[in-house]
Image (spheres, rainbow, N blue to C red):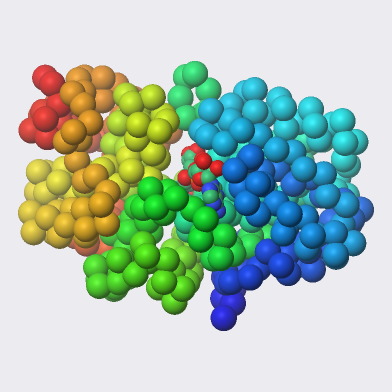
Amino acid sequence: MTRTVHVDLANRAYDVVIGRGLIAGAGERIAPFARNRRTAVVSDETVWARHGAALSASLQAAGLSVYPVILPPGEQTKSWEGLAQVSSQLLDLELDRGDLVTAFGGGVIGDLAGFAASIYKRGIDFVQIPTTLLAQVDSSVGGKTAIDTPQGKNLIGAFHQPRLVLADLDVLGTLPDREVRAGYAEVIKYGLLGDFDFFTWLEAHGAEVLAREPEAVAHAVARSVEMKAEIVIEDEKEAGRRALLNLGHTFGHALEAETGFGEALLHGEAVAAGCGLAFRFSAHLGLCTGQDAERASAAIAASGLPVSMAGMGPFSADRLVHHMAQDKKAEGGRLTFILARGLGDSFVARDVRPEALKAFLVSEGAIS
Ligand code: NAD
Ligand code: GLY
């Protein structure tokens, strides 16, 4: 069964189609968005080797000319160099505004290709075909695009909504277990931030999602995308409520920064640890109960994801606080966190006191 979530953003509205076997029919769905019947397909070597032939065949069968732009896999590709490579290749292909960029990969490719599309000839249309669980439930929806720079992650970017998102659940079959778990962190994040019923469903069915049982994965992806779409429709440019999607991310980004933004700690793993820390910090501040914090951690830990800094550090509390002060949500030097009043009930907390944060981090094992 195919499910469609409509992201209702006026003249930037689009559908997110979720289901099995979507690659085979991708050409028919994408062709209406390629007026010149040409598309550059930006992908990484791993995804292209496994699924590129099937996608190319589908696009060509629908009458589209396909121009692959293939990059090395990994976070380091989402860089100035990666952006220069994609942009140069688009220029060499002499694509114009009647052409289309197709982002075919995980969050790295989606963020990079989307950003290149946003600046190429001042903006060209793009579609997303996300191939990781993380990209299907989060990064392909909502129009945030970016690259990383030596100064930090996702600091250079743009809002550029895709014209269509095709989340083919079959492609998750080739995804390594560790990447499935990392994507699951973003799934459980939705339950924790705003849907207690979804959280309890994940407590009961999370193992089925991780085992990629079709019905469970379909429900988890669809519910996540529905929640993301609802928030993005209300607050596209993150003036307010969209910040809730960053539950766990302020702690998580600081841990990623300290571990080098790479294989040592994947983004989703950092978000999982960050969600555990955000709930315990909320309990520490008396905002939610200790039982809620324990239940959040237990649900995350049941999937094999980290819920704390244990086994990662040691980290300096001052360095972690410094990273958190650089977070994009921070304004005028004020620390901003997504904290919780309970399971499924998070909120944006501005003016978190650095001393309280530091004391909490030390209680979690950071060095004073
Ligand atoms: P990724 O794109 O690096 O993919 C992870 C790994 O899986 C890569 O090695 C890739 O080659 C491989 N892979 C992808 N699909 C595969 C498949 N079907 N089969 C086998 N291997 C496959 O990482 P990710 O976790 O998808 O994305 C992380 C990025 O997403 C980060 O840069 C993060 O900042 C970004 N992100 C963006 C948003 C947003 O709203 N734009 C939201 C969350 C995360
Ligand atoms: N991943 C957070 C957002 O899209 O806002």
Residue at screen point 47% across, 19% down? 151
In the rendered image, residue 29, in percent from the top left (x then y), is placed at 75, 67
**318 sits left or right of 184 in the view:** left
Residue at screen point 74% across, 38% down? 69
Residue at screen point 12% across, 55% down? 294
Residue at screen point 34% across, 35% down? 265
Pick out the residue farthest to the bottom. Answer: 1
**214 sits left or right of 347 in the view:** right
The answer, for residue 224, to whether it is visible in the render is yes
**Which one is nearer the viewer's eye here, 82 or 247?**
82
Q: In this rendering, is residue 345 above or below 90?
A: below
- How many discs appear? 0
**226 sits left or right of 57 in the view:** left
Dividing the picture into quadrants, the one containing residue 83 is top right
**Dividing the image into 4 quarters, which one contains the N terminus?**
bottom right
The answer, for residue 330, to whether it is visible in the render is no
**252 sits left or right of 232 in the view:** left
Q: In this rendering, is residue 182 above or below 335?
A: below
Q: In this rendering, is residue 241 above or below 146?
A: below
In the rendered image, residue 333, in percent from the top left (x then y), is placed at 34, 25
**Dividing the image into 4 quarters, which one contains the C terminus?**
top left
In the rendered image, residue 279, in percent from the top left (x then y), is placed at 19, 49
**Which one is nearer the viewer's eye here, 323 or 330?**
323
In the rendered image, residue 128, in percent from the top left (x then y), is placed at 65, 54
Dividing the picture into quadrants, the one containing residue 121 is top right
